């Protein structure tokens, strides 16, 4: 009896982790414009929810611990979903960096050699000439871009923004496949 109950708790917990993780991915896909894929995940998510929730609700008076396991699975799913979101990193970003003028020139050259498109603009800081670097990249390359900037200018100010749409400009289709 104990092992059967433990197995049921584990099934509830891991089913809930999977369901909530799928929900996280579904939300990301909706926000990034992948409606058909999101709809498929929504179907799977709802299916899991119906079976697991009915199992918990139907037996909550005899086994109130199932509700706690269900809630723990939800928390585990939120945590797992956040890890998945960072690993998948769908979408594009726009990185803006304000650096010293000298560092900006070097950073732009290194980023361009690495295959990233960089736009530069001269700027004036409070006490010195500055350079603004604007880099368009895939989200999964955010760490690469920011690390290259910080290596040459640890004092750089970096702002990263998610992009929902981009149009025009020079974006090489071959480069876009790689980066």
Image (cartoon, rainbow, N blue to C red):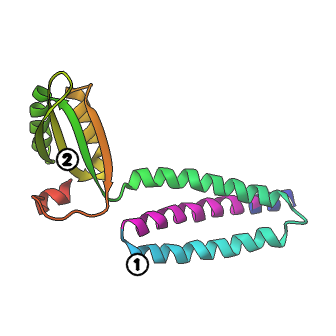
Q: Is residue 144 left or right of residue 80?
A: left
Whether residue 8 is situated above or below residue 76 in the rendered picture: below
Q: Residue at x 72, y 60 (%)?
A: 70
Label 1's element?
helix
Residue 113: percent from the left, percent from the top?
10, 42
Q: Main secondary structure of the magenta part?
A: helix
Residue under pointer 1: 36
Q: Which mark is residue 92?
A: none
Residue 75: percent from the left, percent from the top?
64, 53
State whether residue 150 appears in this view. yes
Q: Is residue 25 magenta?
A: yes
Q: Residue at x 65, y 57 (%)?
A: 74
- Crowd around label 2: few <14 · some 14–19 · many ≥20 (10 Å): many
Residue under pointer 2: 135
Q: Is residue 83 magenta?
A: no
Q: Is residue 82 left or right of residue 113?
A: right
Q: Residue at x 76, y 63 (%)?
A: 8
In the image shown, does 60 or 163 lie closer to the viewer? 163
Residue 176: percent from the left, percent from the top?
17, 58
Q: Is residue 53 left or right of residue 166?
A: right
Determine whether label 2 and label 1 are within 8 Å by CB.
Answer: no
Give the residues drawn in magenta, as a range.
9-32
Label 2's element?
strand
Quadrant of the frame with the N terminus: bottom right
């Amino acid at each position: 009896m104990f092992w059967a109950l433990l197995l049921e708790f584990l099934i509830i917990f891991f089913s809930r982790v999977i369901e909530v993780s799928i929900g996280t991915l579904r939300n990301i896909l909706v926000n990034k414009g992948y409606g058909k894929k999101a709809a498929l995940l929504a179907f799977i998510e709802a299916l899991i929810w119906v079976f697991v929730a009915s199992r918990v609700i139907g037996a909550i008076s005899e086994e109130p611990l199932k509700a706690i396991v269900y809630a723990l699975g939800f928390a585990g799913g939120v945590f797992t979903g956040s890890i998945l979101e960072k690993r998948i990193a769908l979408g594009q970003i726009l990185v803006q960096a304000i650096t010293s003028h000298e560092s900006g020139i070097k950073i732009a050259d290194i980023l361009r050699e690495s295959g990233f498109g960089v736009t530069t603009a001269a700027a004036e800081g409070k006490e010195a000439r500055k350079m603004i670097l604007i880099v368009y990249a895939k989200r999964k390359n955010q760490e690469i871009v920011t690390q290259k900037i910080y290596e040459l200018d640890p004092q750089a100010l970096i702002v990263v923004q998610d992009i929902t749409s981009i149009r025009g400009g020079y974006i090489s289709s071959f480069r876009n496949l790689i980066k």
